[in-house]
Image: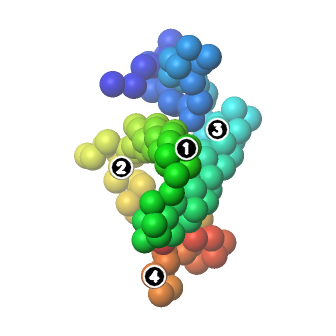
Amino acid sequence: MMPTDSQGRPMRLLPWTTASGAPCYLSAAGPGSRMSRMADDVEEELLISAEWLLDDVEPLLTAPPADTQELIRLSTSLAVALRNILRIADSRGARLPQAGTEEAVAATEEPAERGKTECCGAETVCRACERRIHP
């Protein structure tokens, strides 16, 4: 369950933690605040980093085993990337409108802010900005 602010609004789980590993939350009136935009940018960078890491790891799955130190480094990096992706998924999932609410109904009636998506070959891309969404 996501914590709420003093006005009962759910707080946003941020893509970083405290020095001790505790989750950080943002109480903001809307997604356009400076901190929300910064969190969006950090999420984007974490997703890109995970994609790059996956590109580095995939060739190793068909190659001869790497040395132990390389496997430890890659395993550690994969664990960090997966933890970041799961935090982003939790944060975004918590911000989705709940089924049956007026907000959920409105969200299904209005087009997405960034445009529609389409599948081009093996990639899903946003037609508005032509950025890759999923391989």
Location of residue 50 in the rendering, given as x and y in whole percent from the top left corner: 56, 53
Left or right, residue 9 beside residue 18: left
Left or right, residue 93 beside residue 38: left
Q: Circle 1: is it few (<14), some (14-19), or many (20+) Cα within 10 Å? A: few
Q: Secondary structure at mark 1?
A: helix
Check disc 1 and report the residue beneath it: 69
Task: Give the alpha-carbon distance from disc 1 to disc 2, as whole Å.
Answer: 48 Å
Q: Residue lying farthest left?
A: 100
Q: Secondary structure at mark 3?
A: helix
Left or right, residue 75 beside residue 28: left
Instruction: Give the amino acid at mark 3.
Output: Ala
Mark toward the start of the polypeptide (4 vs 1): 1
Q: Which mark is residue 39?
A: 3
Residue found 62% across the figure and 52% down from its top: 49
Q: Secondary structure at mark 2?
A: helix
Q: Nearer the viewer, residue 90 or 135?
A: 135
Location of residue 63 in the rendering, given as x and y in whole percent from the top left corner: 47, 69
Residue found 51% across the figure and 57% down from its top: 66
Check disc 2 and report the residue beneath it: 104
Location of residue 15 in the rendering, given as x and y in whole percent from the top left corner: 57, 35
Mark toward the start of the polypeptide (2 vs 4): 2
